[in-house]
Image: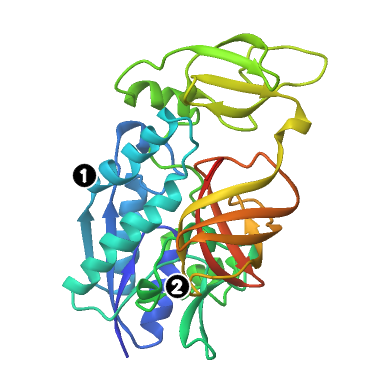
Amino acid sequence: MARVAMAMSGGVDSSVAAALLKEQGHEVIGLHMKLYHGPENEKRPKSCCSLDEAIGARTACHRLDIPFYVLDYQKEFRELVIDYFVNEYSHGRTPNPCVTCNKKIKGDLLIKKVDELDCDYLATGHYARISFNQETGRSQLARPQDLRKDQTYFLHGITAHELQRLMFPLADIIKPEVRKIASKLNLSAAKKPDSQEICFVPKDYRIYLKQELSQVPESGEFVSVSGKILGKHLGLPFYTIGQRRGLGLSDSTPYYVVKIDKENNRVVIGKEEDLYSQTTWVSGVNWVSISPPEEPLCVSAKLRYAHHGAPATVFPESENQVRLEFDAPERAVTPGQAAVLYQDEVLLGGGWINDSP
């Protein structure tokens, strides 16, 4: 059996994952990351970084009789996740901090700590699966049994090398069964609601940005897709592609944000039909389960976590940049968000959406 470091969030998933590993005979060590414990954060029980979650992680480890350690990564979280979040919005892009956190913090930093603790593997409570492709001789990241809880989208930044060090004990279990196991083990997290929010951001992200931005964003022009000036915007960070509310513009049919023009400090406004595009570019592509392709590749491209995936063709332009051509125009393809590429159940790779090469 192996020596396994278990990332303990304090929720039901990581608690049950730890229990399953111990039941299988592994030597399990619980690790909880202290990332962001701001005062407003403590009032939000569904936040993954609240004090309640830290207490839950400690309680679960005590119940399971496994060692428990707290890792203080607040400085790293600030630099690698929060600063990235603010910087992306300030440049007219819409960030995905959960993807970045899974890569930079839960991936890079935590795997280094696993080595320091002389552990063989890092396990997490993600709903994901690792399979092995006999033909290519490499591990693959794949969807779990519970497709409704599939979290592979957030893990596309994990490298092929890191994947060999990971374990996902919940790969073959659906969420209701996880809660049943937690109840049988008398784990306090059994009825705890799932974390659903960005841990450091209040409901309206604009309030947070106003506090964090080093200078007040410069106002500029709302313009139509034809270039007609429609009004004034409050600053590029406060808008995202597909946004309809808070524009202060009226017409017989709704207006939407269709493009953010950073160079000219303009927000381009259009109608529903203007939100659709058939081509986008993806940079910083990390190929998890395959080698970088040299020929066009048919994929299902997932453009947001809740997106079902769009049939598309990948055209490689370099080892880590591709052009993505959708079979049919896609709505609100948003620069700064992740485009994650699948074939059937296997996650091939993913990167960051750009509106130009």
Q: Specify whether 27 is left or right of 308.
A: left
Q: CA distance from mark 2 to mark 1?
A: 35 Å
Q: Nearer the viewer, residue 200 or 352?
A: 352
Instruction: Note whether 162 is above or below 131 in the view shown.
Output: above
Residue displayed at 41% across by 66% down: 15
What secondary structure is found at the residue carrying circle 2?
loop
Residue displayed at 37% across by 37% down: 41
The residue to which callout 1 is attached is 75
Tell me, yes or no, if residue 193 can be seen here.
no
Instruction: Name the front one of labels 2 and 1.
Output: 1
Q: Specify whether 47 is left or right of 64.
A: right
| Residue 244, percent from left and from top | 67, 25
The residue to which callout 2 is attached is 185
Q: Specify whether 281 is left or right of 155.
A: right
What secondary structure is found at the residue carrying circle 1?
helix
Q: Which mark is residue 176?
A: none
Determine the residue located farthest toward the right in the rendered image.
252
Q: Nearer the viewer, residue 18 or 34?
A: 34
Tell me, yes or no, if residue 221 can be seen here.
yes
Instruction: Note whether 91 is above or below 188 in the view shown.
Output: above
User: Quarter of the image holding residue 79?
Assistant: top left
Q: Specify whether 101 is left or right of 225.
A: left
- Earlier-in-chain disc, 2 versus 1: 1
User: Quarter of the image holding residue 29?
Assistant: bottom left
The amino acid marked with disc number 2 is Leu
Residue displayed at 60% across by 29% down: 259
Instruction: Note whether 22 is above or below 71 in the view shown.
Output: below
| Residue 326, percent from left and from top | 71, 53
Q: Residues within 10 Å of mark 1 (few under 14, many from 20)?
A: few
The amino acid marked with disc number 1 is Lys
